[in-house]
């Protein structure tokens, strides 16, 4: 027990050789004050940081992106209309005139 000036006194509380708190007796009242351990403080800060980082990551991953294609409708003949999509670029046709006339395509063998 530690005597303080006046009528106050401190009674430290230990568990397994480590201080965990102190009883403060002053003015006819007894109060318990817990000791903040650095290990617990670091563990709590690490846990809070992990939760904040996970929340931020989920918020970034779950952000809804607008669709790359506008409205898709089916036409009367079974053709599909993609509204809001630019027309594809035309590739140069390097085939000879007779191949274009016959709509012939080059035979490519995958091996």
Image (cartoon, rainbow, N blue to C red):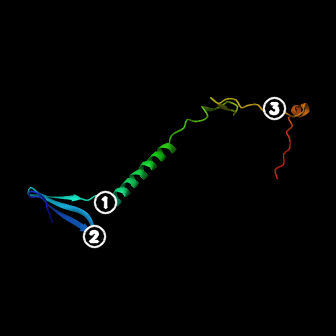
Q: Earlier in the sequence, mark 3 or mark 2?
A: 2
- Mark 3, residues whose alpha carbon is within 10 Å: few (<14), some, or many (≥20)? few
Q: Which mark is residue 15?
A: none
- Mark 1, residues whose alpha carbon is within 10 Å: few (<14), some, or many (≥20)? few
- Say above or below: 26 vs 86: below
Element type at mark 1: loop
Q: Which residue is mark 1?
A: 37
- Say above or below: 50 vs 16: above
Name the residue rendered at 86%, 41% in the picture.
106
CA gap, disc 2 and disc 1: 13 Å
Name the residue rendered at 20%, 61% in the picture.
22
Name the residue rendered at 70%, 29% in the picture.
87
Q: Earlier in the sequence, mark 3 or mark 1?
A: 1
Q: Point out residue 4 in the picture as x, y percentages from the top left corner.
A: 13, 59
CA gap, disc 3 and disc 1: 74 Å
Q: Which residue is mark 3?
A: 92
Q: Quadrant of residue 101?
A: top right
Element type at mark 2: loop
Element type at mark 3: loop
Q: Count all numbered tags in the image, as a single digit.
A: 3
Q: Point out residue 17 in the picture as x, y percentages from the top left corner.
A: 28, 70
Marks 3 and 1 close (CB-CB < 8 Å): no
Given residues 55 and 29, the one toward you in this image is 29
Q: Quadrant of the N terminus?
A: bottom left
Q: Which mark is residue 17?
A: 2
Q: Does residue 56 appear left or right of residue 74 in this picture? A: left
Q: Residue furthest front?
A: 5
Q: Quadrant of residue 37?
A: bottom left
Q: Point out residue 31 in the picture as x, y percentages from the top left corner.
A: 16, 58
Q: Does residue 45 appear left or right of residue 20 in this picture? A: right
């Amino acid at each position: 027990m530690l005597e303080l000036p006046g009528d106050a006194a401190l009674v430290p509380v230990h568990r397994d050789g480590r201080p965990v708190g102190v009883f403060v007796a002053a003015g006819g009242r007894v109060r318990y004050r817990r000791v903040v351990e650095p290990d617990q403080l670091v563990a709590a800060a690490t846990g809070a940081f992990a939760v904040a980082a996970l929340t931020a990551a989920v918020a970034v991953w779950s952000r809804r992106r607008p669709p790359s294609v506008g409205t898709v409708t089916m036409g009367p003949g079974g053709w599909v209309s993609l509204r809001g999509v630019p027309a594809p670029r035309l590739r140069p046709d390097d085939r000879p005139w007779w191949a274009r006339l016959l709509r012939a395509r080059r035979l490519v063998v995958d091996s």
